[in-house]
Structures are given as structure tokens and as C-alpha cells.
Image (cartoon, helix red, strand yellow):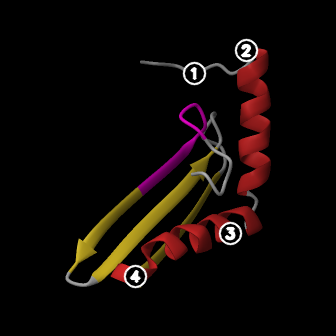
Amino acid sequence: MGHLGAGCSLPLGVYGYWHGDVFTMYARVTSTDGSRKIQATGSAGAVDTENLGRILSELLLEAGAGAILTEDAAQACLGTTTQKLY
């Protein structure tokens, strides 16, 4: 999250799990209206988990996640984001 410049109010999700000595991580950035989704997946050994997070962040940014995060952050600051909770 830090490498993407994201925080708790931005549409970013990460899930990871261990299978033996291998850590697998899934990361996704989604626009607040759900119309755009970018995801990345990767695996690494125990000594490379932090590097894995950076690599996935870079893949997300290369695929356009930066634009989604920037647009959604601007909308949130302006109070123009609308979400249905039902």
C-alpha cells in the first residue's frame, strides 16, 4: 500500500497466504464505482515477501492503477464519490 501511495480510504485490497515456504499475494485496485479493476498476483520465498509487494505495486501502476487511485482520491476529497450501501 505504501508503494502505491494508498491509504485506508482508497480502493485497494491485498490478500496473501503461505503454502509451505512460498508466500502468494493477490493485490487489486478497483475504482470506487467498480467499473475498473486491475489486479496482480505473485509468489515468493520467505526472504522476498517485501520485495514481492513492491513488484506487485509496480505491476499495478504499470497497468494503470495510479490513475484510478489519483482519480478516486480527488473525488473523495471533493466529496463527489457516491456509494450504495444496500
**Apparent side of residue 86 relative to residue 77 in the rendered image (left or right):** left
Percent position of residue 65, x then y: 71, 55
Going by the numbered disc 3, the residue's amino acid type is Glu
Q: Which residue is mark 1?
A: 83
Of labels 3 and 4, earlier in sequence is: 4
Please tell me which of labels 3 and 1 falls first in the chain.
3
SS state under label 3: helix
State the image quarter where residue 82 is shown: top right
The answer to whether residue 53 is visible is yes
Give above or below for 32 relative to 18.
Answer: above
Judging by the rendered image, the residue that carries numbered circle 4 is 47
Task: Using the image as rendered, state which of residue 16 and residue 35 is in the foreground.
Answer: 16
Q: Nearer the viewer, mark 2 or mark 3?
A: 3
Query: Are the two marked residues, 4 and 1, in contact with CB atoms closer than 8 angstroms?
Result: no
Q: Is residue 80 above or below residue 53?
A: above
Q: Are marks 3 and 4 in contact (CB under 8 Å)?
A: no
Identified by mark 2, the residue type is Gly
Q: Residues within 10 Å of mark 2 (few under 14, many from 20)?
A: few
Residue 79 bears which disc, if any?
A: 2
Say which quadrant the C terminus sits in: top left
**Alpha carbon of mark 2 to alpha carbon of mark 3: how far?**
28 Å
Spatial CA distance of label 2 from label 1 is 11 Å
Real-space Cα separation, disc 4 to disc 2, in angstroms: 42 Å
Helix, strand, or loop for circle 1? loop
In the image, which residues are magenta?
7-14
